[in-house]
Image (tube, helix red, strand yellow):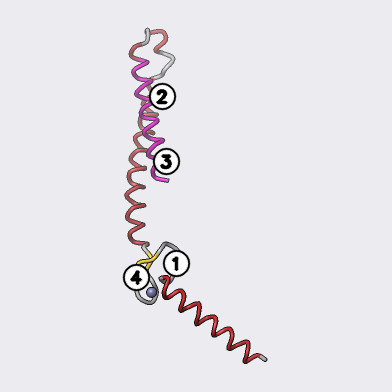
Amino acid sequence: MSSTVLRLGLWILILVLAAYVLHESMEEQNAELIPMALLGKALTLGGILVVAGIVLRIFEKSAKVVVKNRCAVCRTPIVHGAIYCREHLRSVLHAEDERLHQTKIRGR
Ligand SMILES: [Zn+2]
């Protein structure tokens, strides 16, 4: 997400720069084809996008550090979205399995 915004902002800045160079090298009549007011707006937009992209990138990085998951039992760092580490996931599933078996047997 952040890299997309950043890239878009940089592209706009490059285009504005190219348009500006083109504007400067053009004859006065043709130069009016590229309104400077529009270039100014595009430059502002590009600048905002670049800044937003950088801020988003910093945000994403810090968010990743904060959201880093840990096993609910032993606090080992684990993959995103998981609750337990491999070892404890297995034991928890095993315990769950036994619990279900017991209820089934009890039900009969
Ligand atoms: Zn664990």
The crowding category of the residue bearing disc 3, from other C-alpha atoms within 10 Å (few below 14, some 14 to 19, many at least 20), is: few
Judging by the rendered image, the residue that carries numbered circle 2 is 38
Say if disc 3 is inside 8 Å of ligand 1: no
Query: Which residue lies at the image location 33% right of the left edge and 46% below the top edge?
Result: 55
Judging by the rendered image, the residue that carries numbered circle 3 is 4
Q: Residue furthest right?
A: 108
- Give whichever of discs 4 and 1 has the lower sequence position: 4
- Give whichever of discs 4 and 2 has the lower sequence position: 2
Judging by the rendered image, the residue that carries numbered circle 4 is 76
Would you say 106 lies left or right of 82 here? right
Query: The residue tagged with tag 2: helix, strand or loop?
Result: helix
Cα separation between marks 4 and 2: 54 Å
Q: Residue 51 versus residue 81: which sits nearer the camera?
A: 81
Q: How many marks?
A: 4
- Give whichever of discs 4 and 3 has the lower sequence position: 3
Cα separation between marks 4 and 1: 11 Å
Cα separation between marks 4 and 3: 33 Å
Give above or below for 15 relative to 52: above
The crowding category of the residue bearing disc 1, from other C-alpha atoms within 10 Å (few below 14, some 14 to 19, many at least 20), is: some
Tell me, yes or no, whether the two marked residues, 4 and 3, touch with CB atoms within 8 Å: no
The prevailing secondary structure element of the residues shown in magenta is: helix
Please provide percent x and percent y for residue 13: 36, 29
- Between label 1 and label 2, give the one nearer the viewer: 1
Query: Which residue lies at the image location 34% right of the left edge and 61% below the top edge?
Result: 66
Query: Which residue lies at the image location 41% right of the left edge and 63% below the top edge?
Result: 79
Give above or below for 44 relative to 92: above
Query: The residue tagged with tag 3: helix, strand or loop?
Result: helix
- Give whichever of discs 1 and 2 has the lower sequence position: 2
- The range drawn in magenta is 1-23
Judging by the rendered image, the residue that carries numbered circle 1 is 82
